[in-house]
Image: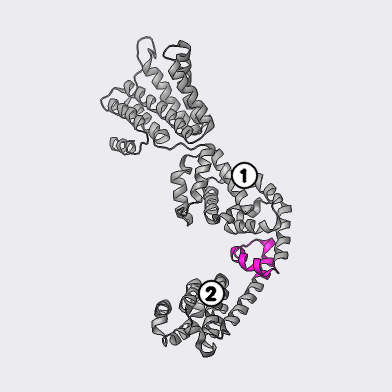
Amino acid sequence: MIRLHDLDELLLQLRNESSKTYILEGVRAYKVGANRAAIISIWIAVAYDIISKIREIAEQGDSEARSEIQGFDKLRKDSKNDKSSFRKLQDFENELLSKALKDFEFINDSEFKYLERIKEDRNLSAHPAFIDSESLFNPTGELVRSHIVHSIKYLLIHKPMQGKAAFDRIMADVKRKSFPKDYESAKKYLNSKYFDRSKDVLIRNIVNGFLTGLLDGCVSRDGNELNVTNTLFVIFNEFPEIFEKQLKNKLPKLIEDIDDSSLWNLLTLISSNQTIWSFLDQASKLRIVEFLKMEATGRNELLNRFGFIKSINIEELCETIAQMGVLVSAEVEKEIIDYGNSGSYNSAFENGRDKILPLIPYFEAENVRNLITVILSNKHDQIFWAAGSEKIIEAVFDGTEEVFQKVKESWLLLSEKLTEYPDKYERLIKKIKTKAK
């Protein structure tokens, strides 16, 4: 049962001040037992709020809403002197819930039924309707209280979300540097700002637009790949039926239209959520398999992209990805050797910056051991003395923490040597000793 203090908490969440005024009139009438008057005020709040929402998205650029509001404003103006316009205005009010459901999707089918009951009870309360020849409609306090709660929970506290204008706002949002970078934060942000009351058409448009942008490379060029990917997978978890349907309908055609180089973008997407593979048609799967076999020998793309796809565990791709991993491992070892052969302070810094730092995501335990070995055996300790070496070696430590237990002895051996340069490596020494405890 909804208690009075629960109503007060709901009232604090109201968005529109005018809607709030009307619903508060309803609450006051309910509290003194004027139940028919309460229901009339509740319906006025519902009707006013729907019109306000349509006006709001019209101001944001929605053409359908703009046309609706222009028609409404004209009827309201003409109704002062024209009885036919007044009747049309009454028809407009009578159709508001249907518009909210079908045209603008402010509410769903279930919510429509509850709000429709408010309208029906309002008609019984406002007109001389009789249950029988002697009794007026006499709503109970419990019925009025439920109408108040339903009007607030299903309509009055929610923002309108509609069509192209909403899509454009989300697009602008994901391009901002302030857009949350981790998935959980992005999920909270998107749900609270957009997805809690979004239309299905908006979700479909986002999936279609963002998938296209990811696959054709536009998103990568803009530097928004992470934000777009997070947004897509919030939709995947919050609206799975819409997401899956759009994937089945759109992916095969999108893949058919992109060139081979853009298949890396698709593989990056698959690595984020491997269930996407199940939505590909056979032709697309065969094309990706062949593409990976071809790219497995290309050094630059291999090193740039392998970090994104190495976690893929799909039967058709596993063998090729494993072969790529062998090539990457060989490349990592080659760069480690070059780093160990650094013959000057300057070359030690440049080799660490250009050869080691970019490859940290590919380091396995054996690579860490070998790196420490070449650092310790570097001629004349050029690496230890080089500017920036403390940051480079510490970056390797931070980036390979998951294998620390396998290489703990090597790090401890290195930390003993680092004590000869306490001012330079003090922070790294402390990290190693703390981790080794």
In the rendered view, tell whether residue 334 sits above or below residue 105. below
The percent position of residue 424, horizontal first and vertical second, equals 41, 81
Specify the farthest residue to the front. 346
The percent position of residue 44, horizontal first and vertical second, equals 38, 24
Amino acid type, mark 1 = Gln
Nearer the observer, 344 or 230: 344
Which of pointers 1 and 2 lies earlier in the amino acid sequence?
1
User: Which residue has dot 2 on it?
Assistant: 353
User: Which residue has dot 1 on it?
Assistant: 246
Question: Residue at 68% across / 62% down in the picture?
Answer: 317
In the rendered image, which quarter is residue 31 located in? top left
Amino acid type, mark 2 = Arg
Does residue 377 appear to the left or right of 73 in the view shown? Answer: right
Check if mark 1's residue and mark 2's residue have beta carbons within 8 Å: no
In the rendered image, which quarter is residue 358 located in? bottom right
In the rendered view, tell whether residue 52 sits above or below residue 245. above
In the rendered view, tell whether residue 411 sits above or below residue 357. below
